[in-house]
Amino acid sequence: MKFVHSFLFVIACFAATAGYAQRDKAVSPLLNQPERYVYDKDLLDLSFHMQRREALREMMPANSAAVFFTNPVRNRANDVDFPYHPDPNFYYLTGYREPNAVVVIFKDLQTIDGKKTTDVIFVQDRDPAKEVWEGRRYGKEGTKNILGFSVVKLNTDFEDFISALKKYETVLITGTPKGAVNESRSKADLYDMSEAFKSKSGYPDGNINSNELRGMMARLRQIKTEEELVLMRKAIEITCEAQVELMKNLNPKMTEYQAEALVEYVFAKNGAEHVGFPSIVGAGENSCILHYITNRRQLTGSELLVTDIGAEYHGYTADVTRTLPVNGKFSPEQKIIYELVLKAQEAGIAECLNGKAFRDPHNVAFKIITKGLIEHGIIKTDSETGNYFMHGTSHYLGLDVHDPGTYGKLEPNMVITVEPGIYIAEGSDCDPKWWNIGVRIEDDILITRGDPVNLSESAPRRVVEIEKIMAGNKATGTTK
């Protein structure tokens, strides 16, 4: 079958190429307008990416250029790849979402191919045969028309361009791509471009600077523009709806993977292209594993289910965690731990103020949890808190679920999470009545010039609210 498939692929490639040539006069206006196939009308505008490049340029030193490679294609198994995801920095600066591309941004105006420009992007060419199998490409014209680049070159031209970088005092780069694979049928895949850059630029020595660009991008990306916040609000809204639907439908007959399927159905139904990260859906003993993603366990009626999930919408991801009693009612011990985590979270959110240190929300949450664990006899001294609360309370959020940032002072238009937790695994040095109680509550918080804004508040957090929603399902006598 593999031989037959390969043979048919070759025939199809010849047929497609010949067909394009024969139909060129009749349909080329359609084929050469990839913007016609941009179906989403709320993508970031090309002006956003142009402004982000300009903002980076202002940070760059004199007589410098910055080089950004996009992400490699990742193989899943044999001839099946994972769905492609561009490098977030590359996407942020370009809007380009295809593989095998490089962008070079200049501090000062340059003349390339007779045109004045401050950047040049190298992209893959149109390929009629491959587009039949893999989808339409932008090519040079599409990249110009849709993304607003004045100078677009094919990625096959990048190797010859590299020597021109030696004239700059500094060439900034965050690093070369990791995991790129050399495709024998491609003359300029990401592997080829990366290897050419390393061999011809003098990387990592000479005028190459691999230290400063990452910090520049962190300073840029930690402050969200209004356009970004629109997409983030959408991703968070979708995620909150998924959490509420799970509250309405959760029951002891389900498995972890059925709970996962429900929330990810809501994601897709509302237009999210991906999950921002593998969904964490862990019950009972699995509620005490921070990044549990196996999601195969059968639920039972007396346990808690931690759901740490995030829809990705046009590249931007949410990150919202709720902890639910599978049978719809918190036990006395579960309620004590839950209320303690909620108290810590609310205190942490209150600390999300302009000018506060990034670590302040964590510090106040940690103190509250420490005090509560001591009061309930779970620990005896402050030094034991880390046995049950072993992670930080906050991280930046954006194109990455753990977005880059400087971790300095909080500033308006930053979006951070506040997510304290308590995880008491079986066998812990405390009364067994607390064992296998894992609780995390996480919300996405917008820093403003005034009070913090909880962008994910539409997903209820309080015990009485959660139990009321879940009781509505049980009252019907159905399990939906």
Image (spheres, rainbow, N blue to C red):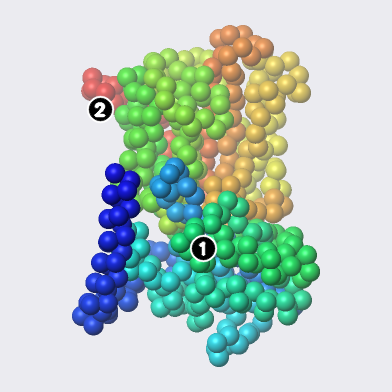
Q: Is residue 420 left or right of residue 154?
A: right
Q: Please give the name of the residue rendered at 78% of the width and 65% of the height, measured from the top-left corner.
A: 205
> Which of labels 1 and 2 is toward the front?
1
Which numbered disc covers residue 480? 2
First of labels 1, 2 by sequence position: 1
The furthest residue to the right: 206
- As rendered, which of 415 and 143 lies closer to the eye? 143
- As rendered, which of 413 and 383 lies closer to the eye? 383
Q: Eyeballing the image, is 320 above or below 156? A: above
- As rendered, which of 278 and 462 lies closer to the eye? 278
Residue 135 visible to an observer of this rendering: no
Under circle 2, the secondary element is: loop
Residue 253 visible to an observer of this rendering: yes
Q: Quadrant of residue 266?
A: top left
Q: Please give the name of the residue rendered at 64% of the width and 14% of the height, measured from the top-left corner.
A: 428
Q: Please give the name of the residue rendered at 35% of the width and 26% of the height, measured from the top-left corner.
A: 250
The amino acid marked with disc number 2 is: Lys
Residue 209: image location, x then y, percent? 75, 65
Which numbered disc covers residue 152? none
The amino acid marked with disc number 1 is: Asp
Q: Is residue 59 left or right of residue 81?
A: right
In which quadrant of the rendered image does the C terminus lie? top left
- As rendered, which of 348 and 194 lies closer to the eye? 194
User: Residue under circle 1?
Assistant: 189
Q: Are marks 1 and 2 in contact (CB under 8 Å)?
A: no
